Amino acid sequence: MRRDGPAGVVAAHIAQVGAALRGLTVGGVDIVTPYPEGSPTPFGSGIVLAPWPNRIRDGRWTDGGTTRQLDITEPDRSNAIHGLLRYAPYEIDAAEGSATLSATVFPQHGYPYTLRTSVTYALTEDGVEITHEVANVGDGDAPVALGTHPFFCLGGVPTEDLVLAVPASTVFEVDDRLLPTAEVPVSGTYDLRGGARVGDLDLDTGFGSLERGDDGIARTTLTAPDGRTVTMWQDGNWDYIQVFTTDAYPGQSRAIAVEPMTAPTDAFNAGQDVRRLAPGESWTARWGVSLSR
């Protein structure tokens, strides 16, 4: 997809598998971290996470008094991770400046519900706006949470030299399986409201209680030494962010994922901010990313 903007052409590359945002440029500048064509998606880069983001302990959760068992998809930590659509092929309806990708979650062991999901990528003059819609098209109230897994960069600037600012006032303490043990006020290394250099961070960490502007939008930024800024914004449906840093991303000395989530890790067990959609009910949530100079 491509369109003209004040800073030049805005172009996005969307993958059919996982509905992943695998590339975004504004005026020729990469702001979504690319990876080689034909290679497996590294670290779930850009994929949609539904009907839950992040991890579920032991893949097991209680649903109205019934214990559900999901497949273990993170074997080294014995968790179910990142939902049921990360490897799903989506149907695509594309236009010049937008594309809608749709997929169905069918009833299965561990999740006996039917959801019709879609994600629409619409280019703006300085980035992209993403709209997620989930509809319960089956029987019974279906628990749902959403997330996405984008990696961000600023073309021409080493990612380790970017300054990350996250408007979160709480952070999740975790055990050795990266499952939450407590949500506490941010402090020290985890207080990123004033910004911190990416190269000084080593995170696979969830944040909550996002501070928002008068418009109800929370904004996370990555700023280069020359002042150019990548902004990820999220509407009021998304009150959590997972930040993940790695030095093992293909072709990058350092990479960072900033993952908007509507519920925290292991939310199906904690019951925290999980939506229950009645049959026929739908839910829409929006976020986006832009480049300012």
Image (spheres, rainbow, N blue to C red):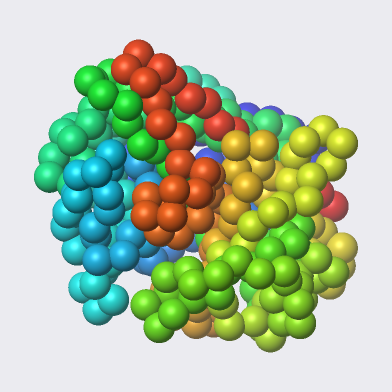
277, above or below 254, in the image: above
Which image quadrant for residue 253? bottom right
Left or right for 248, reference 137? right
**Is residue 261 visible in this depiction of the protein?**
yes
Left or right for 53, reference 189? left
Closest to the observer, 35 or 61:
61
Q: Residue at x 70, y 76 (%)?
A: 190
**Is residue 39 visible in this depiction of the protein?**
no
Q: Position of residue 228 (x, y in %)?
A: 82, 59
Which image quadrant for residue 250? bottom left
Q: Residue at x 23, y 27 (%)?
A: 114
Q: Residue at x 84, y 52 (%)?
A: 293
Q: Position of residue 100 (x, y in %)?
A: 43, 26
Which image quadrant for residue 19? top left
Q: Position of residue 30 (x, y in %)?
A: 61, 56
Q: Residue at x 45, y 59 (%)?
A: 265
Residue located farthest toward the front when viewing the structure as drawn? 65
Left or right for 257, reference 250? right
70, above or below 98, in the image: below
98, above or below 210, in the image: above
